[in-house]
Image: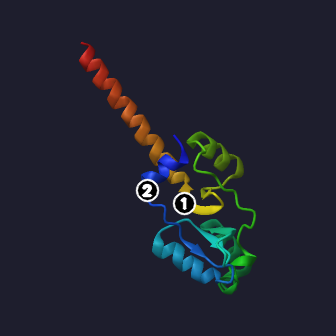
Amino acid sequence: MSVAHILSTKSRDVITAKSQDTVRSIAQTLATKRIGAVVILSATGKIEGIISERDVVRCIALDGAGALDLEVSSVMTAKVKTCSETDSESELMAMMTENRIRHLPVVHNGKLTGMISIGDLVKFRIEAIEREAADMKAYISNAG
């Protein structure tokens, strides 16, 4: 299945922030929205970076509580891996595994159109396996 199909079953909303925001505000957003990453956008809507829970933890571990007052631009991952709506679930799983990341912004025609997490992929895969098992049970019970 494609990224577009996965996005059709969930919200396309993506929580974003600006590179001038503080790590504290990002941590608050991550906690209140119960999400794992925030995409950092420029004023024109271009992806400038991404900051995840792991990034926040790492900067606090290195700089202590003062890290919360740092600008996101000094902590975020600037080289963001993205995917397209035509990518398959297996391509995403490979990219996430290879790059040790859990979130991929989805870009279509140069615009941010969604976010896929490893949790989305696991959920999608489990649902597909359960559908296959149900179809097999129905087939077997109708064949007899």
In the picture shown, does residue 69 fall above or below 102? below
Q: Residue 57 or 27: which is nearer the viewer?
A: 27
The percent coordinates of residue 86 (x first, y second) are: 59, 45
- Residue under numbered circle 2: 10
Residue 85 is left or right of residue 62, and the answer is left
The answer to which image quadrant residue 36 occupies is bottom right
Residue 73 is left or right of residue 16, and the answer is right
Image quarter where the C terminus lies is top left
The percent coordinates of residue 77 (x first, y second) are: 72, 67
The percent coordinates of residue 109 (x first, y second) are: 63, 57
Residue name at image x 75 percent, y 63 percent: 79
In the picture shown, does residue 10 fall above or below 53? above
The answer to which image quadrant residue 24 occupies is bottom right
In the picture shown, does residue 7 fall above or below 59? above
Identify the residue at the far front of this view.
109
Task: Give, as a three-letter code, the residue at label 2.
Answer: Lys
Element on which disc 2 rests: loop
Q: Residue 81 or 43: which is nearer the viewer?
A: 43
Q: Please rate how many residues cluster around mark 1, counting C-alpha atoms within 10 Å: few if below 14, some from 14 to 19, many from 20.
A: many
In the picture shown, does residue 17 fall above or below 79? below
- Residue under numbered circle 1: 114
Q: Residue 79 or 98: which is nearer the viewer?
A: 79
Task: Give, as a three-letter code, the residue at label 1.
Answer: Gly
Distance between the alpha carbons at the discs numbered 1 and 2: 9 Å
> CB under 8 Å between callouts 1 and 2?
yes
Element on which disc 1 rests: strand
